[in-house]
Amino acid sequence: MEKPGKHYFADKDIQVILGTLLRVGVIASMTVVFIGGLLYLSVYGNTGADYHTFNAAKTQYSSILAIFQGMSRLDGRAIIQFGTLLLIFTPVTRVVFSIFSFLIERDYLYVLIGIFVLGVILISLSNKLVG
């Protein structure tokens, strides 16, 4: 016999929510990248690409702040980068949601594991996105 109040959500409900979260995140990311691609092509569509030499000045959207500043100017490259960020943060959001669902279920071991996983993800991303 189960303890009263142990299961607030059925496992199937949580799986449906997590699946929907991932699906919406991917679709939103794809839409943002598509819009950014259209803006990029409208501005730079006629210019050729030079892949023989690396130009560090073209890596201007390598931080979150720079991406948001570029988006405020409707720069297609920044919007594409933002769509990529959405794609990266979709599974991070899934981990956060999982932590809260484990808290509701009072599965504290899985809460700790989820917090550990979230910490590893955020530490690994912090060097790439903030710098």
Image (cartoon, rainbow, N blue to C red):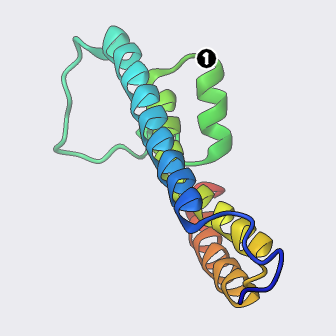
Residue 29, position as x, y percentages in the image: 46, 36
Front one among 125 and 96: 96
Residue 104, position as x, y percentages in the image: 79, 70
The vertical placement of 39 against 82, above or below, is above
Q: Residue at x 45, y 22 (%)?
A: 76
Q: Give the crowd class for mark 1: few <14, some 14-19, many >=20 residues within 10 Å.
A: few
Residue type for callout 1: Arg
Front one among 107 and 69: 107
The vertical placement of 94 against 33, above or below, is below
SS for tag 1? Answer: loop
Q: Residue at x 26, y 14 (%)?
A: 45
Front one among 27 and 9: 9
Q: Quadrant of residue 35?
A: top left
Q: Residue at x 66, y 20 (%)?
A: 72
Classify the position of the N terminus by image quarter: bottom right
Residue 75, position as x, y percentages in the image: 51, 20
Q: Is residue 7 toward the left or the right of residue 56 in the image?
A: right
Residue 103, position as x, y percentages in the image: 78, 74
Q: Which residue is tagged 1?
A: 73
Classify the position of the C terminus by image quarter: bottom right
